[in-house]
Amino acid sequence: MAVADLPDIIDDLDRTLTSIEAVVDPAAKKVEIAKLEEEAAAPDLWSDQANAQRVTSRLSRLQAEVERVAELRQRLDDIQVLLELALEEHDSDSQAEAQRDLASLKSEIEALEVRTLLSGEYDDRDALITIRSEAGGVDAADFAAMLLRMYERWAERHGYSFEVYDISYAEEAGIKSATMAIRSPYAYGTLSVEQGTHRLVRISPFDNQGRRQTSFAGVEVLPAVEETDHIDIPEADIRVDVFRSSGPGGQSVNTTDSAVRITHLPTGLVVSCQNEKSQIQNKAAALRVLQARLLEKARQDREAEMNALKSDGNSWGSQMRSYVLHPYQMVKDLRTNYETGNTDAVFDGDIDPFIDAGIRWRRREEAAAS
């Protein structure tokens, strides 16, 4: 951006931030924060664990939202003052500093603008991501492993904590499936647009004739369950199997039968967890994943009742993104048409432009359907 364009850019960002402030409504949130702080200070708060979690979680998220908007407003005001002084005094160093600061601020305001589009029932929750290899044999298993690393790197880029609950390794390379949790406010709403079938086209490293191979992997994104959800799972409705955790090639990584597989008999849903050494911890983690899937099923059932002949918004077509590594390099979202030629960066977790475009696309689709 040229220095002469900076005042106009500041004006545009001011308008964008003003619209964000109208949606976030810091004044109303401060009133709610004050009420929650009173509840959090009550000496008997933790006598009701579910309510205590609701209060503290809501308070933390509201405080973060209000502080974030206030910080961006202050930074925008400071840059405006810095630029005005720099232009008056013809201070090229200060002009360059304002230019750098504004570029960074522009990116952050645009990201927050996308966040304001997340208004779904569970959008503010942590995310559970399950990746499964589909058609394409060993290449599909390898592709699934590449996607798992992509989401891990995305979380690392943002400083979000994540945990892989379960991995089922393929025999030759890659993985059959994996389930991971990403913990951050709005992780589910942000990553929900990643759900669907991903397609990879490349020269197969597993084909000794060097032929081009097309393979597929499916991504499922669910909201994490909270204590207040009350998803009751009677013991009679589940079958719990224990087995020995194993790593690639079948090599044992645990000398006890600590891995847990839970089958929900009424629905046939199956989940497993083997990342902990304790069978009790693995069972608890597997139950959390099962609860999340039952919660999502309940949500879909409610939507199906209201829209019997209308898709639920998650079935966006069998293929949602294509990763081409040969004969050219390009990653393209088939819903938004956003694309990039930097495939290495994408597989290294640089997927925010795809996510932002997906969220904006979804909002347009919802508005058109309403």
Image (cartoon, rainbow, N blue to C red):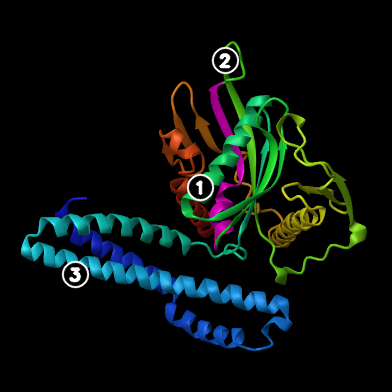
Q: Which residue is mark 2?
A: 211
Residue 186 on the magenta span = yes
Residue 161 lies, in percent from the top left, at: 57, 55
Could you tell me which residue is drawn at 49 percent across and 75 percent down? 63
The residue that appears at 57% across and 83% down in the rendered structure is: 36
Left or right: residue 14 compared with residue 271: left
**Sequence-first disc among 1 and 3:** 3
Farthest residue, direction front: 255
- Does 82 sit left or right of 103 as displayed? left
Amino acid type, mark 3: Val
Q: Tell me the kind of residue under disc 1.
A: Trp
User: Which residue is labeled 3 in the image?
Assistant: 81
Which residue sits furthest right?
236
Return the mark for residue 154.
1
Crowding around mark 3 (Cα neighbors within 10 Å: few <14, some 14 to 19, many 20+) is few
Q: Earlier in the sequence, mark 3 or mark 2?
A: 3
Q: Could you say which is closer to the camera, residue 294 or residue 127?
A: 127
- Looking at the picture, how far across and down is residue 21, in whole percent? 39, 72
> Secondary structure beneath disc 3?
helix
Q: Which mark is residue 162?
A: none
Screen quadrant of the C terminus: bottom right
Residue under the point 84% across and 48% down: 268
Q: Answer with left or right where residue 87 lies relative to residue 362.
A: left
Q: Secondary structure at mark 1?
A: helix
Which element carries disc 2, helix, strand or loop?
loop
Give the amino acid type for the residue marked by disc 2 in the picture: Arg
- Label 1, label 2: how many angstroms apart (C-alpha)? 31 Å
For label 2, the crowd category at 10 Å Cα-Cα, with few meaning under 14, some 14 to 19 and many 20 or more, is few
Q: Above or below — where is 123 with respect to 212?
A: below
Q: Which residues are drawn in magenta?
A: 185-203
Please name which of the two marks, 1 or 2, marks the residue nearer to the observer. 1
Distance CA(mark 1)–CA(mark 3): 35 Å
